[in-house]
Image (cartoon, rainbow, N blue to C red):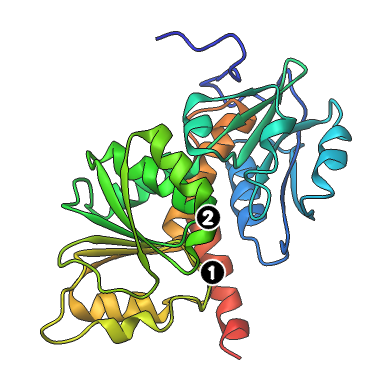
Amino acid sequence: MAAPSWAAPVRSDPGRSSPRGNTAAVLGSPITHSLSPVLHTAAYAALGLDDWAYQAIECDEAGLPGLIASCDSRWAGLSLTMPLKRAVLPLLDHTEPLAAEVGSVNTVVFAAGQRLGYNTDVPGMLAALAEAGVTAPAGATILGAGATACATLAALRETGLGAATVQVRDQARTNGLLAAAHRLGLAVELRPFGSQVRDGDLLISTVPSGAADFYPERFGVNRPQPGAVLDVVYSPWPTPLARAAAKSGAIVVSGFDLLLHQAARQVELITGIEPAPLEAMRAAGQSELARRAPLTAR
């Protein structure tokens, strides 16, 4: 199928000439912890894009319209993290169908004078799970109901699932999740946060660091155990949830794996070059996490 006329062009050669700018950034609040600058900068270096730059910019929902409006021809694209993935939607000229279904955008590409929105969390999650051998889960439980949980629903649909259990702390704040599930054609069962997981489920935690630390108490003898666990947290690692899952014999997928694969797709969209240099990005990210480890352990 041909790409729509508004889609960002893709080049297979890493030449330095480009019709777009050479500046990119990740926006969010808080943002100082972000590993994205390390991953994207490593990708640019491996691709020979010596004049490209990528930075982290603190930006909340109130500041997003002005910041995007200030992006001139020097800008190639943006990565977005919390709390901006939904707030950006009305600021775009076009949104890819997948991102529209999910209801969140984590990548903005500036091309042909337009702002194009994409969601790379979905393909990134699928790639991270597949890398660990998780391609056809029997069932799934999601912790949390935010933008990443909505992307998780889309990823689960691609694995062939038609339903998922979602554990939430406040059912009054699930409108966005339920709307996404309806658009995606998935049935969702809402359960209280911390409920028991069905035996063999793929458990995906989309909540912030520390929010699921109590969950290992749910693991134990004569209790249902998840078959695989993906925790979107990547630092500090392993999380208590990841340690308990590994001890129980479950397959464990880290937040770094998800971040790496979604960032690789972002690089392809923003630079217009495929494929992204995944291993160079992986090495740079792992090195940075190792450097940070003594600091996060304090």
- Nearer the N terminus, badge 2 or badge 1? 2
Q: Secondary structure at mark 2?
A: loop
In the rendered structure, the answer to whether residue 256 lies left or right of residue 23 reads left
* Residue 200 drawn above or below residue 121: below
Residue marked by disc 1: 208
Amino acid carrying mark 2 in the image: Gly
Q: Quadrant of the N terminus?
A: top left
Classed neighbour count for the residue bearing mark 2: other residues with Cα under 10 Å, few (<14), some (14–19), many (≥20): many
Residue marked by disc 2: 146
Classed neighbour count for the residue bearing mark 1: other residues with Cα under 10 Å, few (<14), some (14–19), many (≥20): few
- Residue 297 image offset from top left, x and y in percent: 56, 87
Amino acid carrying mark 1 in the image: Pro
Near-viewer residue (133 or 96): 96
Name the quadrant containing residue 195: bottom left
Residue lying at 76% horizontally and 51% vertically, measured from the top left: 55
* Residue 222 drawn above or below residue 192: below
* Residue 217 drawn above or below residue 161: below
Q: Secondary structure at mark 1?
A: loop
Nearest to viewer (mark 2 / mark 1): 2
Residue 268 in view in this figure: yes
* Residue 211 drawn above or below residue 25: below
In the rendered structure, the answer to whether residue 292 lies left or right of residue 232 reads right
- Residue 5 image offset from top left, x and y in percent: 59, 8
In the rendered structure, the answer to whether residue 241 lies left or right of residue 196 reads right
